Image (cartoon, helix red, strand yellow):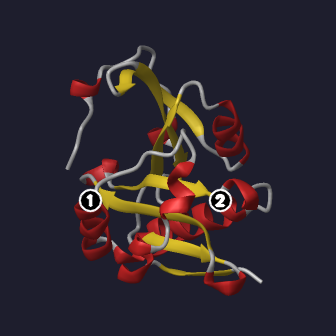
Amino acid sequence: MTTIRRFCCNDLLRFASVNLDHLTETFNMSFYMTYLARWPDYFHVAEGPGNKIMGYIMGKVEGQGESWHGHVTAVTVATEYRRQQLAKKLMNILEDISDQIDKAYFVDLFVRASNTPAIKMYDKLGYVIYRRVLRYYSGEEDGLDMRKALSRDVEKKSIIPLKRPVTPDELEYD
């Protein structure tokens, strides 16, 4: 049986195997600790029998005005646990928190333009490509900024695609 629960400090010592996928961004320990301290509601883990970590999601809420949004910093599922809809369940948790608790207008995420399986999954979850970010990943590969409007964005303004690609220095960060 799978349990989805909040990520805790001890998980930082147990989740390295989930990050072995070459498409998963791996960060330093202080980065994970910052997210855990600042946005604990946005950091969840899927745990299987024997307390094995199957996957996790980490994110945050940021922006101002109509740009107030939930952001998926990372979502990944270990190879052996894929195709069980764990990523979908983790995404739903982050979307619900963004929508119901933080009253965000949308949720966004960045994905490598070459990661076709992830792009297809996000599309099935209702995300659209908002814009292409040139050389977003290590200054080499383009990223896609994908968004899903939430209930507060009644007119769906947040997901109207931009007509031109942008560069990383044009992105807004909080």
Measure how far apart labels 2 and 1 are at the Cα level: 21 Å
**Quarter-wise, where is residue 120 in the image?**
top right
Mark 2 element type:
helix
Name the residue rendered at 79%, 62% in the picture.
Answer: 84
Dot 2 and dot 1 residues touching (CB under 8 Å): no
From the viewer's side, name the closer residue of 114 and 164: 114
Give the amino acid type for the residue marked by disc 1 in the picture: Phe
Name the residue rendered at 24%, 38% in the picture.
Answer: 172
Give the residue at mark 1.
31
Q: Position of residue 6 (x, y in %)?
A: 48, 81
Q: Label 2: how many residues lie within 10 Å, few (<14), some (14-19) or many (20+)?
A: many
Q: Label 1: how many residues lie within 10 Å, few (<14), some (14-19) or many (20+)?
A: few
Name the residue rendered at 32%, 55% in the picture.
Answer: 68
Residue 9, above or below 127: below
Q: Is residue 12 visible?
A: yes
Name the residue rendered at 35%, 61% in the picture.
Answer: 60
Which callout, 2 or 1, points at the residue further toward the start of the chain? Answer: 1
- Left or right of 36: which side holds 76? right
From the viewer's side, name the closer residue of 98 and 154: 98
Give the amino acid type for the residue marked by disc 2 in the picture: Ala
Mark 1 element type:
helix
- Left or right of 47: which side holds 174? left
Q: Is residue 154 visible?
A: no
Give the residue at mark 2.
87
